[in-house]
Amino acid sequence: MVISFCQAVVTCVLLVWFVRVTDGMPDPAHRDLLLRQEASRQTGGTVTLTAAEQKLDSYLRRLKEQEMSAAQFLPALHFFKAKPLIQKSSIFKLLQKMPKGAALHVHGSSLVSVEWLVKNVTYRPNCYICFTWDNSVRFLFSDRQPFPRWDCFYWQLLETLRARVGDPTGFDNSLMQHLTLFTEDPDNQYPNQDVVWEKFEKAFIAAAGLITHAPVLRDYFYRGLEELHSDNIMYVELRSGLSRTYDLDGTIHDKVWTLKTFQEVTKKFIADHPDFVGTRIIISVHRALSVSEVTAAVKEAIQLQRDFPDIVAGFDIVGREDGGRTLWYFRKALSLPAELGATLSYFFHAGETDDEGTDVDQNVLDALLFNTKRIGHGYALAHHPLAKELSRKGNVAVELCPISNQVLKLVSDLRNHPATVLMAEGHPMVISSDDPSLFGTTGLSYDFYQAFVGIGGLKANLGTLKELAGNSIK
């Protein structure tokens, strides 16, 4: 209330000054005050820097001026083309060293680099592969040759196939292509959102047979935490459907087993890395499900959060928003916790669309109506002034994933990302990576670079970085 009163006073004073402006030269003092007032509103605008931080901030600005005046502005290039150039950036190297707080929007099935999956997991004994009719692959661990199924008529032992091919490096690279979106010619290979999303979903399905093998899941999760920790991240919240996992003998484990595994691996990782704070799971279901299926999932999530309060953070509905079912479509299922007098936190994907005015475009408002704790992506939020105001007043942070938005073709030049408006207004925001393995990233440094240089522009400074990292903890 005090802040609102102070802002109102400042606004009134500025209005008085504008009334007094004549046709002559504007008062330089008034101009300076306006510039300072505007700068104070941006993300990090009220952060006080120490003398040492001010020195670093000046150095960062010089580096940014050099990169922004270069022949190629990297955030304007497709990330697949920009990545090797970003790796050479002095700003990027500084960001790698920076404590980045928490990664709050990461999907568990794309947590670990595909190179580790291929070079480590596919070399394990009893790993079978099948090539599908739609130019994809499936993996399965089995103590005998798996039976044919509708999408896989012929399974081959990967060890035997790799030896027969005779070019393990080339073969491994071809496997990686099935597990990632990376390509040297992204603009032609992914001419529109439909094409890139089709490949996106195929990659998830391809990786599932590897990740859901019980012994692999333990190693996979630990490896994922290692990759995050090496990028100076201290906490993570993973979106996960808690898919059923299997053992070599065909034993199937339920979601409780999977949660206990996450719990055990997290404890071991913290014991090995005492500066790491922990991890929690946001239970996720796909928006292609029916209302009755989502209702059942919400009931289950309520119980799982009761049973595992230290590891289950809440619930989300995932999958491509464009063409998918809206949050309002699932309103009966999402109202269930309140009807039962139960507690279940929501962390909804919302506004991951550029189709302004559609039913899907209303997801940002509906997410807030259902008291979402954060907004996943929120790409469309800048076009919804009321929803933007509500999320700001409620301190509902946007989980900004700039590389994901670019690769999935919502925006090409990140200077045109709607978050430029949100950052200029100091909207609550955190930086995350969404699906790092599919985009060829690890940790958060790449996304921080794109947000700091591309979206924030020259105005974004060390205070911006400090506030973004602090927001993730808050």
Image (tube, rainbow, N blue to C red):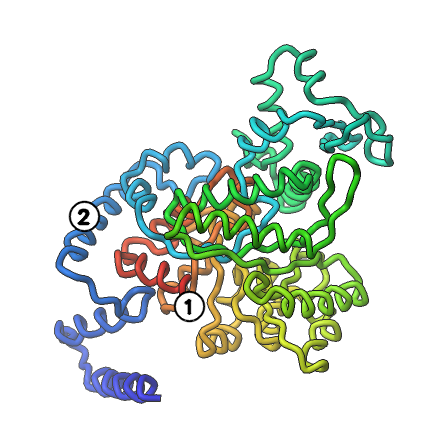
Placement of 364 over or under 141, stated as above or below:
below
Q: Nearer the viewer, residue 231 or 218?
A: 218
**What x and y, as percent, mark residue 421?**
41, 64
Using the numbered discs, state the Cα–Cα distance from disc 1 to disc 2 in whole angstroms: 26 Å
Rendered view: 361 above or below 270: below
Label number found at residue 259? none
Of residues 116 and 287, the one drawn nearer to the viewer in this rendering: 116
Q: In terms of sequence position, does the residue under pointer 1 or pointer 2 come before the other?
A: 2
Q: Quadrant of residue 27?
A: bottom left
Q: Is residue 75 above or below residue 12?
A: above
Task: Give the quarter of the figure containing the N terminus.
Answer: bottom left
Q: Which residue is mark 1?
A: 428
Q: Is residue 377 left or right of residue 452?
A: right
Q: Is residue 374 visible?
A: yes
Q: Residue at x 69, y 68 (%)?
A: 303
Residue ID for mark 2: 59
For the residue marked with disc 1, what is the amino acid?
Pro
Q: Position of residue 210 (x, y in %)?
A: 67, 36
Residue name at image x 63 percent, y 28 percent: 122
Percent position of residue 358, x then y: 66, 65
Q: Position of residue 361 (x, y in %)?
A: 62, 65
Q: Amino acid at mark 2?
A: Tyr
Residue at point 71% right, 26% down?
126
Question: Which one is nearer the viewer's eye here, 145 or 215?
Answer: 215
